[in-house]
Every structure is written in structure tokens, then in C-alpha cells.
Amino acid sequence: MDCLFCKIARKEIPSDIVHEDEKFLVFKDINPKALFHVLIIPKKHIESIDHVELQDKELMGELILTAQKVAKEKNLQGYKLAINVGRKGGQIIDHLHLHVLADL
Ligand code: 5GP
Ligand code: ZN
């Protein structure tokens, strides 16, 4: 798949990886908007929240649980989760990703 985040998931493009498991990769945002700013991507290519299907419902739950896991691992006291959807929603990369932001 010719997609930046698929290439990052396949390690064809380097990233600063914070956490990885079978289904997700968590890496630092290249242009952080907070002191702590990582992106959680499913390794499966899903274009956006608008492209999520019923069969992805478990994966979407696990996406949130991965955010919780990273927050615990990094001992975040509080954090914000954001998903931009579509160009008018601020989405630039067409591979679903969850922003995790925290001021340390
Ligand atoms: P979006 O606006 O699509 O929700 O967010 C895309 C995010 O990906 C932006 O915050 C941007 O800084 C980040 N980003 C874009 N290209 C790269 C890259 O090559 N590597 C990393 N680590 N982050 C990227
Ligand atoms: Zn992709």
C-alpha cells in the first residue's frame, strides 16, 4: 500500500517508536503539538473513521485501550485523544490515526 503510515508500520520509513504490538504501532509525531505527542495507527490500512466498518469494531476498541496502555507506560497524569476526519476535519494523512497529546 503506497501510504506514508503503512510504510512507517512496515518500517520502510523510520519513526521514533514508543510501543508496538501485533495490531498497532505507536510513534512520536514528527511535528509535536504538545510536549508529549504520539500517533497510534492500526497496522491495517483504514483511510479514516469514515471508512471504519462493523468488522473493525473490536480493533477500534483496542485502539482506545492502546492509548490507555501508552498513557500508563508513560505515566501521563492526563491526556487528550484526537482523531481528525477528512480534509475539512484537519486530516492530512489518509490512514486512520489517534493523536495522544499531553503536557508533561
Ligand atoms: P492529521 O492532521 O492527519 O490528523 O495528522 C497527521 C500527523 O502526522 C501530523 O501531526 C504530522 O505532524 C504527522 N506526520 C506527518 N508526516 C509524518 C512522518 O513522516 N512521521 C511522523 N512521525 N509523523 C508525521
Ligand atoms: Zn496506510
Image (cartoon, helix red, strand yellow):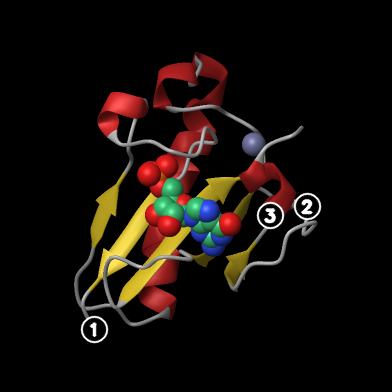
**Does the residue tagged 2 have its C-beta within 8 Å of any atom of ligand 2?**
no
Q: Are marks 2 and 1 in contact (CB under 8 Å)?
A: no
When asked about the image quadrant of residue 44, the answer is top right
Nearer-N-terminus badge (2/1): 2
Which percent across, then down, holds residue 36? 33, 74
Name the amino acid type tagged 3.
Answer: Ile
| CA distance separating discs 2 and 1 | 30 Å
Q: What residue would you read off at disc 2? A: 10
Q: Do the residues labelled 3 and 2 touch (CB within 8 Å)?
A: yes
Numbered label attached to residue 88: none
Residue at 38% in and 36% down: 91
Nearer-N-terminus badge (3/1): 3
Q: In this view, does 37 lie to the left or right of 57?
A: left
Q: Give SS at disc 1.
A: loop
Q: Is residue 94 above or below residue 74?
A: above
Which percent across, then down, holds residue 76? 28, 78
Residue at 64% in and 32% down: 45
